[in-house]
Image: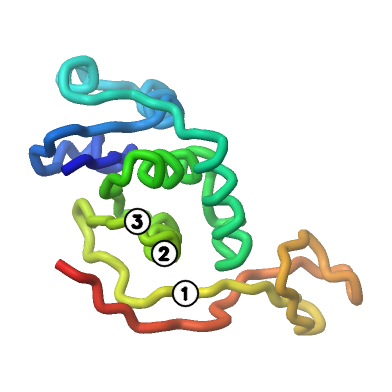
Amino acid sequence: MKAVLDSSALLVGKYPEMEEMLTTPDVIRELEKKGMTSELRSFIEVKLRVASPSEEGMERVMEASLESGDSERLSQTDTGLLALALDEKATILTDDYSIQNLAMVLGIDYKGVMFPEITKRVSWRYRCVGCGRRYEDHSEVCEVCGSRLRTYRKQEENIEKQK
């Protein structure tokens, strides 16, 4: 089985032995900013394949994130991890619930690292903090009153993850 590891999985150092483990260059840059231990650097050099996701994978993830409302909750690094997992038909190892939510939408298998996995698939939308107007798409400010928008859970659906 293949696994795509996010920063938290690598920092914690808690991951099962897989036939192939991958991550993205963005994750490596994040880890370098935080300061890598020599053990982590050795693990990356010996056991991990660093790969960039395809443009098609990135586009699929972006489209799905706009539909689910996760687009404002995901970083470029998160998007790349999901796209790489799509490209490689791999399981993604992450404690990030927004990544897990979109993985569920995209049909990507996921596993938590230190925390329980999500139990509900969430669709996010936006609401003005001033007048309460609701929006399907993200914007910084309300077009009616000029107040900022916040995300809210439009819909929750219980999920039963297959083991």
Label 2: element kind: helix
Residue for badge 3: 108
Q: What amino acid type should be assigned to the residue bearing mark 2?
A: Asn
Residue at 30 percent across and 50 percent down: it is: 94
Q: Position of residue 125 (x, y in %)?
A: 63, 73
Tag 2 and tag 1, C-beta contact below 8 Å: yes
* For discs 3 and 1, the disc positioned in front in the rendered view: 3
Q: What amino acid type should be assigned to the residue bearing mark 3?
A: Ile
Q: What amino acid type should be assigned to the residue bearing mark 1?
A: Val
Between 17 and 36, the one nearer to me in the picture? 17
Query: How did the renderer colour the structure?
Result: rainbow
Q: Mark 2 or mark 3, which is nearer the start of the sequence?
A: 2
142 to 45, vertically: above or below: below
Q: Quadrant of residue 6?
A: top left
Tag 3 and tag 2, C-beta contact below 8 Å: no
Q: Mark 1 or mark 3, which is nearer the start of the sequence?
A: 3
35 to 71, vertically: above or below: above
Label 1: element kind: strand
Between 149 and 62, the one nearer to me in the picture? 62
Quarter of the rendering occupied by the C terminus: bottom left
Residue for badge 2: 101
Residue for badge 1: 122
Residue at 26 percent across and 65 percent down: it is: 117
